[in-house]
Amino acid sequence: MTGAVLALATFLTATPQSKPAAPEAPPIAPMDARIVLHLPAPTQGLPAFRQLFTAAGTKAPLLRPVTFERLFRPALGADLFDLEALADAGIDPQHPITLSQWRGQWLACFTTRANPTPTDERGARQEPGADGAGEREVALAPLPLPMDASASGRSGAGAQSARPLKPVRFEEQGVTFRGQADDTGAWLSGRARLGSLVCSANAIGVDVRPLLRLAADSLRDANASPARAPEPQALALVGERAPLVGRFQTRHGRLTARFFPNDSGLVARGKLQGSGELLAKPEPKASQPLHQMTRSAPDVPVWLNLSLSKKALAAGGKLDQALDRALRHSCLDCPAEARLALQRRLLESLSGPVALAITGLDPRAPRGSPQQIRQAIFASVREAEQPKLKTALSAIEPRLAQSRFGVGLRGGTLSLGNDEKLLKQVSTPSETASAPPPKDAVRLTFHGARLAELLQPISMFDMANGSLFGALFFLKMEAGALIKSADKLELTANPVGPDIDFEATIALGQQKKR
């Protein structure tokens, strides 16, 4: 059933479209960059994010501002969250800043100040404190401008080579390139400049020239038509203005999101290109029973509700693959013929609404065992198909019981899982008032305190029991306290044509004022 968790997560994404805004300066980044982070108005967005990450960093070390400062300083040449430091480094924070990752290398693109402070007049800068809240503890030597290569070929964190570097400069199609080359001719740092627009890169043991040439193409595009940009650059700017816009290349398609920090947390709204045909707007009558089940067990650590389309339910589709993995995993000794017969019957019987609950983890269970994850899956079944599905279930039910999995079909809802308590709880009619019909094709909710409890038993020694537990141990150590205190962790998604619109909300809970 581990496969069911991973396969069903494929359908995730989240919200209603926003009204289009007037064009603004597009991101300057390679078109095929894996990650693009665009700050349209740094002076407005950076203080808000610094406040958010300072609060989150008290409980999640990985989210401290100092983490991002160390990540982006080599390319940017300054602390991203320090507007004064950016200005000292020759960057105009009144104009957009774009940070992008291409083949593991980070690129920073920005507008230079008209009259940057000379290097010898800047004075010593300070390093962010360990809590990332902006305190300064250790005095550093003056920082070079990101477009000036240091003697070590490195600005900021960690010199990469003691070999002498040779300054190189040339012009190509209006763009000026400057860099520091080692004895092999590779550029360890460099910049591309067109007018006041600059892109800067700094890497360890990697030639940054290919990245700078891609940056130069984006510079020419931005210089030719600042208010317009070719896809995929313009895609990130559709919708309401936001302090931060992100574009991410995923295996499921290109994802763009707009991030809005607030006093209690963060809201992200965006779009996943493609996969929209796998979801359908929920039909009240078919979705109501599963929606009511979710409400009857609100303390479950993870609830995922889906409304799948006919295409998703087709043979050979995503759900077919998920069912194959789920049945193989939950019934290791089931005859292949009976298992495949049930798989085909399920595809023909399901009406679209599906719910997945994850209630526990057992890292001590044998690797690959169905008992590593305690979970339950529920699905709505068309009335006409229920007798045939019962017959198919009867052929496999005894083998499922051997794997400690319960299966049942009641009131048009199929249930399958190894959490006996939850299966019994949701199959009992609720005495509470009927829940309103669901509005979203995808709804993923986390119960912060219960999720933290679920992660608590995982130790470093459980990392040997599979990559899943390695990732969960890392999550526990880095963000366990933050998850426990979170008031709300929720994602909703809906199909819009071929794409999926989504909204994710993270409410951090009460934070101590610093």
Image: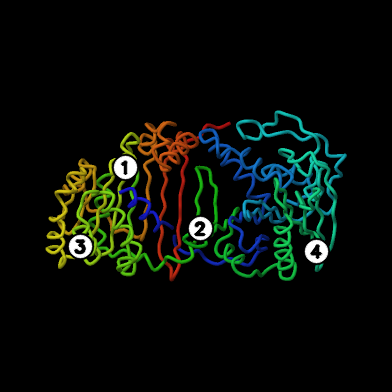
- Identify residue for label 4: 175
Q: Where is residue 320 in the image (x, y as percent from the top left)?
A: 31, 62
- Identify residue for label 3: 341
Q: What residue do we see at 25% from left, 64% from top?
A: 347
Q: Which mark is residue 373?
A: 1
Q: How is the image coloured?
A: rainbow
Could you say which quadrant of the image residue 112 lies in? bottom right
Q: Are marks 1 and 2 in contact (CB under 8 Å)?
A: no
Q: Regarding mark 1 in the picture, which secondary structure is present there?
A: strand
Q: Which of marks 1 and 3 is nearer the N terminus?
A: 3
Could you say which quadrant of the image residue 344 lies in? bottom left
Q: Regarding mark 4 in the picture, which secondary structure is present there?
A: strand
Q: What residue do we see at 87% from left, 39% from top?
A: 121
Between the residue at mark 4 and the residue at mark 2, the CA separation in whole angstroms equals 31 Å
Q: Are marks 1 and 4 in contact (CB under 8 Å)?
A: no
| Residue 65 to residue 3: above or below | above
| Residue 111 to residue 221: above or below | above
Q: Which of marks 3 and 2 is nearer the N terminus?
A: 2
Between circles 3 and 2, the one closer to the viewer is 3
Q: Where is residue 328 in the image (x, y as percent from the top left)?
A: 27, 53
- Identify residue for label 2: 250
Q: Where is residue 278 in the image (x, y as percent from the top left)?
A: 37, 65
Between circles 1 and 3, the one closer to the viewer is 3
